[in-house]
Amino acid sequence: MLILSRKPNESLVIEAPGAGEPIEIVVTEVNAGQVRLGIKAHKDCKIWRKELYLTIQQNLQAAGAAGTAGIRSMASHLSGAGARNGDPSPAQAKESTDTPAAGSGGAGDAEEKGQA
């Protein structure tokens, strides 16, 4: 780690090979236990506080792991694996809603009502 001393209104420049424009960091204010920095960088350069950056990385890793498991679970359920547990597959569920049950307003109900 490089450690530098800077006073208010002094700056340092970071130039990374192949990164295009350099980044300038300016010390704008020094108070008791706190330093305020100004950062001049290209508008496409993403700048994060470290604690926020670490949280974002953890969330991305968790989403990747959960996403794979969630997709596998959904695919398994949609392929009919849920029927082994007594749940109808999507095709079975559609068939049961397309076929009217007795006494539910189907064509045979009119004859039954007329006989009663």
Image: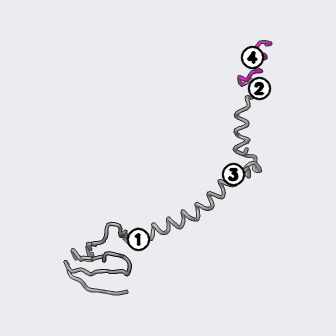
Q: Are marks 3 and 1 in contact (CB under 8 Å)?
A: no
Kindly report the distance in space between the C-alpha atoms of the residues bearing marks 4 and 2. Answer: 11 Å
What is the C-alpha distance between the residues marked 2 and 3?
Answer: 30 Å
Near mark 2 (Cα within 10 A), the count class, few <14, some 14-19 or many ≥20, is few
Task: Choose between 50 and 15: the one closer to the eye.
Answer: 15
Give, as a three-letter code, the residue at label 1: Glu
Residue 51, numbered label? 1
Measure the alpha-carbon separation of dots 3 and 1.
38 Å
Q: Residue at x 31, y 70 (%)?
A: 42
Q: Is residue 109 magenta?
A: yes
User: Nearer the N terminus, badge 2 or badge 3?
Assistant: 3
| Residue 77: mark in rendering | 3
| x and y percentages locating residue 87 in the rendered image | 73, 46
Give the alpha-carbon distance from disc 4 to disc 1, as whole Å.
71 Å
**In this orientation, which residue lies closer to the viewer: 56 or 34?**
56
Magenta stretch: give its range: 104-115
Judging by the rendered image, the residue that carries numbered circle 4 is 110
Q: Is residue 28 left or right of residue 80?
A: left
